[in-house]
Image (cartoon, rainbow, N blue to C red):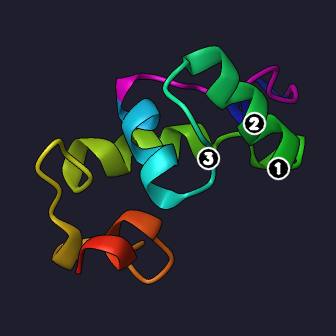
């Protein structure tokens, strides 16, 4: 984590990220380890805190019943584009 002054060693993949990342269209699947691997392959290590951002997005907007119309990511979201 950046707070420690050391580079991130991984990407946080909680249940929200498992839901959000595939909806955004940046990963495929539901296995947290595979999702982390895919995110690490597409983002540079300095951006691995994106897991926290996706987790927060999942808590507030990208719920099981998503609030797509209010979401700041809907302009790049595969789920929103497919379901609007």
For residue 32, above or below residue 80: above
What main secondary structure does the magenta stretch of the protein show? loop
Residue 29 found in image quarter: top right
- Which residue is located at x 77 percent, y 27 percent? 37
Q: Is residue 56 above or below residue 36?
A: below
Picture quarter with the C terminus = bottom left
Label 1 sits on a secondary structure element that is helix
Is residue 11 shown to the viewer in this render? no
Residue 24 appears in view: yes
* Left or right of 13 in this view: 80: left
Kindly identify the residue that appears in the image at 65 percent across and 16 percent down: 33
Q: CA distance from mark 1 to mark 2?
A: 6 Å
Q: Residue at x 62, y 45 (%)?
A: 27
Are the residues flagged by discs 1 and 2 in contact, CB closer than 8 Å?
A: yes
- What secondary structure is marked by label 3? helix
What residue would you read off at disc 3? 50
Q: Horizontal placement of 55 versus 28: left or right?
A: left
Pair 3/1: label in front = 1
Upstream in sequence: badge 2 or badge 3: 2
**Residue bearing the label numbered 1:** 42
């Amino acid at each position: 984590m950046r707070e420690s002054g050391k580079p991130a060693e991984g990407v946080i993949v909680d249940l929200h990220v498992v839901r959000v990342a595939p909806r955004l269209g940046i990963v495929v699947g539901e296995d947290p380890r595979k999702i982390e691997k895919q995110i690490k392959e597409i983002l540079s290590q300095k951006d691995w805190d994106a897991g926290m951002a996706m987790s927060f997005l999942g808590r507030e907007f990208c719920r099981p019943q998503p609030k797509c119309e209010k979401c700041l990511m809907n302009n790049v979201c595969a789920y929103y584009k497919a379901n609007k």
